[in-house]
Image (cartoon, rainbow, N blue to C red):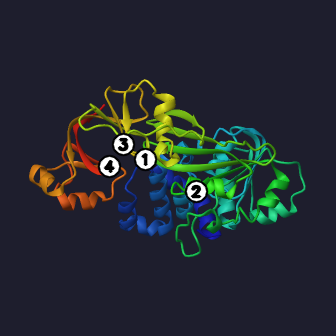
Amino acid sequence: MTLEEFELLKRSEIRQFLEKNINQDSAKIALSKKGNDRHPALVYSQLKILQKSKKKLPSFYKKFCIIPPRAYEQSSSERAASHKKYNGKRCLDLCCGLGVDSFYLAKKFEEVIALEADLTLAAVTAYNMELLGQPKVKVQELPAETFLKTYNGPPFDLIYADPDRRDAKGKRQIRLEDCMPDILGLLSLIQQHTHRLVLKMSPLFDIQEAFRLFPNSLSRLTILSIDNECKEVLIEGDFATPSPIPQIIVICDRQGTALQFEFSPNSSPEIVSPPRFSSNYLCEPDVGFYKARVVPQLLADYFPQLKGSLTHPQGVFLSETLPEAFPGRAFQIADQLPYKPKQLKRLFGKQRMHVVKRNFPFSVAEIRRQTGIKEGGDRFLYCTQMKDEKVAFLLDTREK
């Protein structure tokens, strides 16, 4: 989006058009003769992305904020941003983008300075904060490095950064060293202005990298899962009083109800593979626990009453009884079979089932190819490993 396009979208007649047609089919309006005579393609594109933002950015949707497409794709959802419970007087967001995280941080801070190096996006975000009625977010059009080098005001209670994880060609980056701005390169400057840093990383980020990158300052790792999908990895560093044993937090938000679990990375309960046909239920913890690599700790610390055992530290829990308030999925086991593709093909070939795999060497597509099982249906075939044995569980159709 250019500054000229931004100015066009600010015009009162354009905003009235968007509000009037927010529930209409943007493609049909754009293709109509009357529509093409009135507005450029940009307006219909903005209508389409506003409609798309209704679930992800409901506050922005309600106020008819201006939303550049790339900024929308890279932004946090409001649901994810709402779980950032950091607080204090002054916060600095080094790369605010569309400003969703800044908007929610401002609910807990007296002031948030939000930096954005892109001139147009900075103007858009400042304008949106006015529409949203959030005066505590002060947007500045500056690169993070320039601000940190020239700033001489009071220290910040928190510096927050969600670096751009796409390179100049739009390719996704996972490693912190490859993101922009270069947070590791700016670390000495950051420490001059705060004792507390929070980095938001990709859901694909390997959490072991956090221990390598911040060996002396890592205080907390938070994994945020929404509806059984890992959304964010948050690295929290404390330069003043680092914790000798960083805390691992898993937040599971399922259908709007959030549960928080706390772990120590030094805990490692014993794993015992269960005997065949010994269990009644297959329990799969929320994906956040797999991401944090704390599945054994979850069962040992929070569900010690359960009788059963794990197939693998990153496997599933086979339980004699149905767990209550389990943060994940539990199914009743109908049958347990060795994973022998020819045998499974004779039993289930051409039938329709949901195929799931965990700690298993073959992809779902490969399992379907080997067994002839089609997509769909109302039964589950769950493939995993117990020690060196590949097994397949036929599960009851209803999730418990």
Q: Is residue 19 positioned above or below 29 on the image?
A: above
Residues under numbered marks 3 and 4 in contact, where contact means CB atoms less than 8 Å apart:
yes
- Residue assigned mark 1: 314
Q: Residue at x 18, y 46 (%)?
A: 377
Q: Residue at x 55, y 56 (%)?
A: 206
Which amino acid, mark 1? Answer: Gln
Which amino acid, mark 4? Answer: Gln
Give how far apart the Cα atoms at labels 1 and 4 are: 10 Å
Which amino acid, mark 3? Answer: Thr
Q: Earlier in the sequence, mark 1 or mark 4?
A: 1
Q: Using the rendered view, name the quadrant where residue 72 is placed.
A: bottom right
Which amino acid, mark 2? Answer: Ile
Disc 1 element: loop
Q: Quadrant of the N terminus?
A: bottom right
Disc 2 element: loop
Q: Is residue 241 positioned above or below 374 on the image?
A: above
Where is residue 363 drawn, in percent x and y?
31, 59
Q: Earlier in the sequence, mark 1 or mark 2?
A: 2
Inspect this view and state whether residue 133 appears.
no
Where is residue 132 drawn, in percent x and y?
63, 45
- Judged by depth in the image, the label closer to the viewer, 1 or 2, is 1
Q: Using the rendered view, name the quadrant where residue 219 is placed.
A: top right
Q: Earlier in the sequence, mark 3 or mark 4?
A: 3
Inspect this view and state whether residue 47 appears.
yes
- Judged by depth in the image, the label closer to the viewer, 4 or 2, is 4
Q: Residue at x 65, y 46 (%)?
A: 103
- Residue assigned mark 4: 385
